[in-house]
């Protein structure tokens, strides 16, 4: 992961401060567990009677609302050149610019002279491209290909139709306890991640699946980002068809940008989107999560998905808050996007 920016000065101090705050919240919660349970019960008794919560498509609507808020937050963060959080950017220099700079340095070392105008400054590269300029390019919707719109439609429309044809939402009167709610959320995340990791690993490692689902466009993607590697020396799984063949929508679409932004969280092919949603639906049904737990799970998983794709390694991310390398963070997931290797799970390190 050496291609990514190191932690800024004072990072560990900030992590310790965030851990102290999180620890204080946990201690206060358990010290007043009965009051917290009562607050949850009061909230649930009111929420379950509202038309929005009783709506069969409540969960998809909640997911899209959370996605919108999270994406707007990271979009604003990427647009702000003076934000203090820019210090936590993992790719302060766009990948193409960084590689061009490194090639310039290699040439300079070979000739023992440094070319005039050799790009040294952070945030600049080929053509003076900055983090903000590259972010603007990634975030801008492609109206020609409808990229950025079809993913939302593909997620929402089938669920709305299914919920309309098969209304089934039944809300229990009894609320979940604090411990039950937390256990439901963690268990659902774990089951989802185990299922997703298995499918994701299969896409990368098994040639048949790789060719048919995951990498129809991977040859073009691989060559464009590994120009120093001759095509003849790439693994057989990458030797799929000539690079001039027009790309098709596959998992390579998700890896299309070596510069990772939160926008990439829903840059998915139809097959991937179906698999991803199926993993989540199966997870909450396996754990038999309470409807309130499911709502919290939906908010949490969307926030985590946006965080690992954000391109920021923030002190309060779960991977930093909880010691012991239990959780996978943005640093590892961005590395996976850059290289296409390792870290097939999204959240839990135990799943790889």
Image (cartoon, helix red, strand yellow):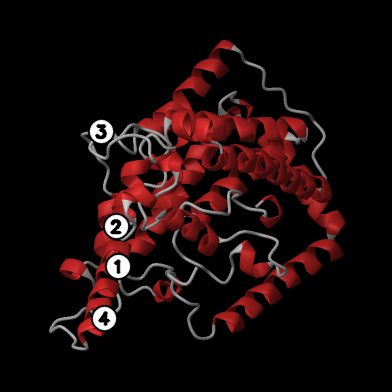
Look at the numbered discs 1 and 2 and tell me whether their residues touch, using CB distance below 8 Å.
Answer: yes
Question: For the point 59% across and 68% down, which residue is it?
Answer: 316
Q: Earlier in the sequence, mark 1 or mark 4?
A: 1
Distance CA(mark 3)–CA(mark 2)? 19 Å
According to the image, label 4 marks what residue? 121
Q: Nearer the viewer, residue 321 or 339?
A: 339
Mark 1 closeness class: few <14, some 14–19, many ≥20 residues within 10 Å: some
Relative side of 289 to 34, left or right: left
Identify which residue is drawn at 51% across, 30% down: 208
Q: How far is mark 3 from mark 4, CA to CA?
A: 36 Å
Give the mark toward the camera: 2 or 4: 2
x%, y% of residue 260? 40, 56
| Image quadrant in which you'd find residue 252 | top left
Is 143 drawn above or below residue 90 in the view shown?
above
| CA separation in Å, label 2 and label 4 | 23 Å
Q: Earlier in the sequence, mark 1 or mark 2?
A: 1
The residue beneath circle 3 is 246
How many numbered marks, from 0 up? 4
């Amino acid at each position: 992961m050496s291609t990514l920016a190191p932690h800024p000065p004072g990072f560990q101090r900030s992590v310790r401060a965030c851990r102290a705050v999180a620890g204080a919240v946990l201690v206060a919660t358990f010290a007043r567990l009965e009051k917290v349970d009562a607050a949850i019960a009061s909230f649930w008794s009111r929420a379950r009677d509202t038309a929005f919560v009783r709506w069969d498509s409540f969960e998809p609507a909640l997911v899209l609302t959370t996605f919108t808020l999270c994406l707007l937050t990271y979009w604003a963060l990427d647009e702000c050149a003076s934000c203090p959080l820019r210090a936590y950017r993992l790719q302060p220099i766009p990948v193409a610019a960084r590689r061009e700079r490194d090639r310039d340095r290699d040439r300079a070392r070979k000739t023992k002279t440094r070319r005039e105008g050799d790009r040294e400054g952070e945030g600049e590269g080929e053509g003076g491209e900055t983090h903000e300029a590259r972010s603007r390019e990634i975030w801008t919707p492609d109206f020609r290909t409808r990229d950025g719109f079809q993913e939302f439609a593909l997620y929402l429309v089938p669920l709305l139709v299914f919920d309309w044809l098969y209304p089934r939402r039944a809300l229990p009167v009894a609320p979940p306890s604090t411990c039950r709610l937390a256990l439901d959320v963690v268990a659902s995340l774990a089951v989802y991640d185990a299922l997703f990791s298995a499918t994701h690993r299969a896409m990368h490692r098994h040639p048949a699946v790789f060719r048919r689902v995951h990498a129809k466009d991977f040859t073009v993607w691989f060559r464009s980002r590994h120009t120093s590697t001759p095509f003849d020396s790439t693994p057989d799984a990458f030797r799929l068809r000539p690079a001039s063949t027009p790309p098709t929508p596959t998992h390579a679409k998700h890896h299309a940008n070596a510069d990772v932004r939160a926008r990439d969280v829903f840059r998915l092919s139809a097959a991937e989107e179906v698999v991803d949603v199926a993993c989540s639906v199966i997870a909450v049904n396996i754990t038999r999560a309470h409807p309130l737990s499911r709502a919290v799970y939906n908010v949490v998983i969307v926030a985590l998905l946006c965080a690992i794709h954000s391109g920021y390694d923030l002190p309060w991310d779960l991977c930093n808050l909880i010691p012991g390398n239990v959780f996978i963070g943005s640093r590892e997931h961005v590395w996976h996007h850059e290289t296409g290797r390792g870290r097939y799970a999204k959240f839990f390190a135990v799943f790889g």
